[in-house]
Amino acid sequence: MALTRGDWSVEGSFNGVTTWTCTVTVGATETDSYTQRTPVGLDPTKPWTLIVNSAGTDLDGQAVPVDLWVGTSGDADLSGAGALTATDCYNFKQIIADVDPDAGVAPTAILMDPTLTTADVANVHVKVPIGACYLMNLDGGSALINAACIFKIIQEGGNGSLDSKYNEIGGDGSTGIGPDPS
């Protein structure tokens, strides 16, 4: 079995909160696995929660950290194994130390906040740069186990693209600001 990356799909929207899911299935020869770029509906200017390995699947016999890659265009992508090849994205940093349940911490939820004013706290919250999109990489130290890792993103709002969101605010579609309400 080889690496299979599912597309992000809307799992649901309730009370103004949207949840997306991406399942990545890993073969027994890969040391890395990664998501597709995040969905267009994710608003990168607002905080969002990332849950990794939501099913608590055994992924490896050792630590499986998660790296965040920031996309610089809608064509952002990762490929390869071990030494990844990046297209239109860069490795920002490791955001989670271990999502393998052997460590007793899976699943792991982390707040991704572009407006964070405090220091990052490992496995809790991180200040992320605003990007066109994001990709998450399971960075195994050895071959991963044949398993599926489920990633979830939860964000208030986030139902459409940024263009449509800003046009809705102003109502005139040209500036996104609209007339002065006073």
Image: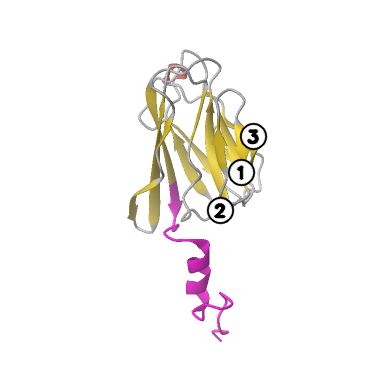
Q: Amino acid at mark 1?
A: Val
What colour scheme does the image use? secondary structure
- The reply to whether discs 1 and 2 touch (Cβ–Cβ < 8 Å) is no
Mark 1 and mark 3 in contact (Cβ < 8 Å)? no
- Give the CA separation, mark 3 to mark 1: 9 Å
Q: Which residue is labeled 3 in the image?
A: 93
> Please, what is the three-letter code of the amino acid marked with disc 2?
Pro
Callout 1: SS: strand
Reading the image, the residue beneath label 2 is 44
Mark 3 element type: strand
- Asked whether residue 163 is drawn in magenta, I would say yes
Whether residue 142 appears in magenta in the rendering, the answer is no
Marked residue nearer the N-terminal end (1 or 2): 2
Relative image position of residue 140 (x, y in whole percent): 53, 21
Dot 3 alpha-carbon crowd within 10 angstroms: few under 14, some 14 to 19, many 20 or more: few
Task: Residue at 55% x, 41% y: name it.
Answer: 77
Q: Identify the residue position indicated by label 1 in the image.
A: 70
Left or right of 7: which side holds 92?
right
- Distance of label 1 from label 2 (alpha carbons): 11 Å
